Amino acid sequence: MSFALPPAPARAAWRLSAITSAVLLTSACATPQPAAPAAATTAAASPAPAASTPAAGASAPAAGASAPGAARPPADAAAPKPFAEVIKDAKRQDGYFAIWRKDEKVWLEIPSSALNKPLLFSVNIANSIGERGLYASQMGPGAMVEWRRIGNQLQLVALNMQFRADGGGKRAVEQAFSPSLIAAAPVASAEHPGRKAFLVDAAALLLSDIPSYSTRLEAAYRLPYSLDRTNSYFEAARADARLSTLTARVHFATPRIPAPPLVPSPVPMPSLPQSVPDPRSLFVSYVYSFQPLPETVMRPRATDPRVGHFMESFTDLGGDMKPNPRVHYVKRWRLDKKDPAAALSEPVQPITYWLDKNIPPRYRAAVEAGILEWNKAFEKIGFKNALVAKQQPDDADWDNMDATHASIRWFVGADVGFAIGPSRADPRSGEILDADIGMSDVFARGSRRFISDDVGKPQGIAAAQLHAGHDAAYCSYGQQAAAEMDFALDILEARGDIAPDSPEAEAFVQAVIKDTIAHEVGHTLGLKHNFKASTTVSREQLKDKAYTDAHGTSGSVMDYNALNIALKGETQGTYNNTTLGAYDYWAIEYAYKPLEAASEAAELGKIAARSTEPALAFADDTDAGGFGPYDGMDPLANRFDLGDDPLAYFKKRLALSQELWARVQQRRPQPGDDPLRQQRSMQSGFNQLFRAAELVGKYVGGMHAVHDLPGTTGRASLRPVEPAKQREALQFLASGLFSADSFRFRPEFLTSLTMDYQEWDRAPVNLPAAVARVQLVALDRLLSAPTAQRLLDLPGYLPEAERKGLISLNEVYGTLQASVWSELKTGSEIERLRRNLQREHLRRLQTVLTRGAPNLPADALSLARLHATQLQADLRTAVAKSGNQSVETRAHLSESLGLLTEALRATMQRS
C-alpha cells in the first residue's frame, strides 16, 4: 500500500494503494502504559502552543550539550553543524528516537545504527473537519520503512513488501520492484561523538502532506487545497522505549473560492465545506508514529479460503515450482500461554483495548461487554482473559491515537454514522500490532440526526457517498445498524411495546451498541465479514426467545445482522443478536489455537475441513456483492437479512414497512413533536424496502456458492438457484415492489407532513422519488448484464435431464415487461407512480436499442429487441383504445409509443 489516497470521495478510512504492501493493517501487542509520562531529562511539559507561536510540549535540558569533540569543523561550510550547537538550550525526550525541542523547533535524533534497518511508520488523523468522510480519530496509512542516508540527505523509504524472495532471488526482486520515498530532509547535525547519532529537522521531514489529505479534500469538495507549512506546527510529542510520536497541526488552505458558473453544470458539484467558519481554511492533525518491529518474528499462519480472515499477502518469487506464487498470512495478534502445559492459561500478553475517554459514561459498560464477549471464544482454545478492556481516565493527558494503543475511539461529525475496525500488522508475519476502532456517536444522538429529511434521498447520503469503495478497513455496520434500530423502535413504539426514552428503549440501544462493538472488535482480531451466518438460524428458532437468548439470532457477530422484529401476532424472539455464534468460535480457533510447528498444517486442515457443517456457512464481502463489477450472485449471502429463507424475510419486511406506515398515519401529530418525525418514520420504511429490492433480485439468475477446496468435499462449488425460488422472487418484485398499491398514503397524512422551517434546505416530501429509489434498484438488477449472462449460462450447469422447468432470460424479460406495463392489457388508468416506473423501463430499453450496453450478451440484445417490438404493438393497441382515459394517461401512452418507435428505427452504435 502506498501513502497516496485514491481520488474516490467515497472513503472515510482510505485504503493504501498497492505500492507497498508493507502497509501494516494492526499496533504493538504489548499492553500500553499511557499514564506513565515519557522519559525525559527535564521536568514538566510546557503548555500547548498557540497557532501563531507554535511551541511543542514536554522536554528536558539538553543532554550531552557540552560533550567533547562537539566543536564545529573549520573547513566545509556545507557540512552539518556540530550536534551540541544545533540543540543548544533545547530539551530532550528519551525514547525509541529521542525528540529535541526548542521553541518552535523540533528535531528527531537518529542513531547511525538505525540506518538501513526496518521499522514501522504510521500516520493517524487525530483532528479533522467533521463532514464528508473527513472525520477525527481515524487510523491512517502505515508502512514498513527504513532510514537511508545519502550523503547529508536523510530519506524515509517505504519498503516494497508486495514481492519477496529468499537467497539469490532476493537480489533480483529488489532490482525489479521499487520502494517508495515517503519523506526526506537534510541531516541537521554532525554525529554526536558519544551516542553515534545525528539530528534531522522534524519540520523539514514531516510537515508535509504525507497521507495525501489534500487529495481527499479535493475529492470531497473539488477545490485545490494545499498544505500551508508556514501556519503548520507540532502541537504534541510522546516518546518511550517502544515509540516516538509527533502530532502535527497541519493547515490547509485554498487561495479563493471560485464563483459559481453562469450556466449550471450538468454534473452535480459538491457544496463548500459547511462545518468550518471559512471554507478557505481548515486544520487537520496528523499523528506520526515510529515504532520498532518485533525482534522475534512471529511464526506466520497460512490462511484458508473456507474461513474468513484478513490477510497479509505478497508474491513469492523465490522459486518457479509453485503454480501460484501468492502467499497469504492470517492477520492475528501474538498470543502465547503463560503456562503452555495448562488446559486454561492466561496469555503472556493479553490483547488490551483502551476505551476512549470521549465515550459517554452511559455507554461504556456496553462497549466493554462487546470487547469481552470474545473471551468466550478464546477460552475454548485454552486462553483465560485473552482480551482486556481498560478505561482511559477522564483527566488523562495522553492521546490514544499513537501506534501503541489498541483503542475504541468515540468521535462526532456533522453527517457521520459508522463504525470502523482497522488494524496494522507486521508484513513479515501478519502479527497484528495496532488497532483503533472508530465508533461515531450515532447511537448517542440517534441516527435520526443524519437520515435525510427528504424521503427521495438515500439514507446516510454523505456516509454512503464517501464510503462506497470496497475497503477491508471500512465497515458500515454501525451506520446501518442505527437505521435498523430506528426502524425497529418506530414499529415497537407505534405498537405500544416500547415507550420513547423508557428503560426498555435504553436497553435496546445498549444491546445494539454491544453487538456493533463486538463486530468491530472481531475485525481487529483478524476476522472478515461473514454474510451467510444469518441463514444458519431458522425462522422457527428466531421466534423462540429461549433459543435466541442463549444462541443469538445469527451464526456470527461478523454478519450484518438485522433486528428480529416479529409480525403482529407472531411470537417475538430476542430483538438483538446478543452473543458470539458458532462461526466466531471456529474462526478464532483457526487463527489462534496454539499448535506445534511440525503439525500445524495438518491441524489447520482439520479445523478448516469443518466448513461443511451447516452452522459454519461462510461468505465474505465479495460474495455478497455491491463492490466493483461483481454484483453478488448468491441470494444467501446478504447484508441485513435474517433466517434460513432470505426471500421470506424480505416479504416480511415489506409487511412491517406497511404496518409502520399505517400506524404512523393513524397517529396524530402532538404539540412539541419534532417537525420531521413523521417524514423520518416514513423514510425508515423506504430504507428497508430499498435494501429488500436490491437483494431479492439476486435470486433471479442466482447461483449458490461455497468456498470448498478442490477434492475436499465432493459437493458442487456452484449450484443454480432453484427455478421455483427464482420465479417466486420475480413474482414478489412484480406484485409487491412494482405495485402502486404497496405505497398508499392517505392525503390527510401527506398534507400533515411539516418541514423544519428553521433550515434553508427544506423541501416537501417527494413520494415518487422515494418509490422510484426502491423500484429502480430492482429494475436495474433484472436488466443487468451479469444477470443476463448467468440466465443464459444456467443450462450449462445442469444435466440435460434436470433442465426441464429452468427459468430463462426470455421468461424474465417477458414477466418483467408484463408486470411493468400490465395496464396495457387491462385498459385501466395508469397512475403517476406506475407511469414513472414505465418511463424508467422504457429509458433502459432505449439505451439498449440505440447504444447497446457494456458486456450485455448478444442473445440478451436480441431478446430485448424482441420484447421491445411486442411492447410497441401493445402500445399501439392501447393508444387506439385510450379515448376514455385521462389526458395524462393518453399523453403518456402516445409519448411512450413515439419514443419506442424511434428507438427501434435507430441504427445501433455497436462496438
Image (cartoon, grey):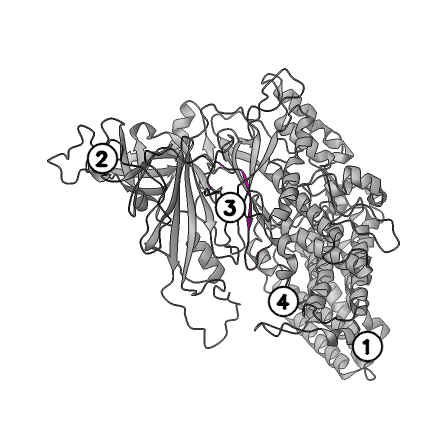
Residue 102 position in % (x across, y down): 28, 43
Q: What secondary structure do most residues of the magenta stretch adopt?
A: loop
Which secondary structure, mark 1?
loop
Residue 249 higher or lower than 67, as above or below: below
- Are the residues flagged by discs 1 and 4 in contact, CB closer than 8 Å? no
Q: Any mark on residue 15, and which?
A: 3
Q: CA distance from mark 2 to mark 1?
A: 89 Å
Kind of residue sitting beneath label 1 = Glu
Q: Which residues are magenta?
A: 402-416
The reply to whether residue 811 is in sight is no
Q: Any mark on residue 550, and which?
A: none
Q: Any mark on residue 83, and which?
A: 2
Instruction: Report the residue at 71% width, 35% height from top.
Output: 583
The residue mark sitting in front, 1 or 3, is 3
Kind of residue sitting beneath label 2 = Phe
Residue 24 position in % (x across, y down): 49, 37
Circle 4 residue: 850
The local crowd at label 2, few if under 14, some if 14 to 19, many if 20 or more residues have their Cα within 10 Å, is many
The local crowd at label 3, few if under 14, some if 14 to 19, many if 20 or more residues have their Cα within 10 Å, is many
Q: Nearer the viewer, residue 4 or 448?
A: 448
The residue mark sitting in front, 2 or 3, is 2
Nearest to N terminus: mark 1 or mark 3: 3
Nearest to N terminus: mark 2 or mark 1: 2
Let me know if residue 527 is in the magenta part.
Answer: no
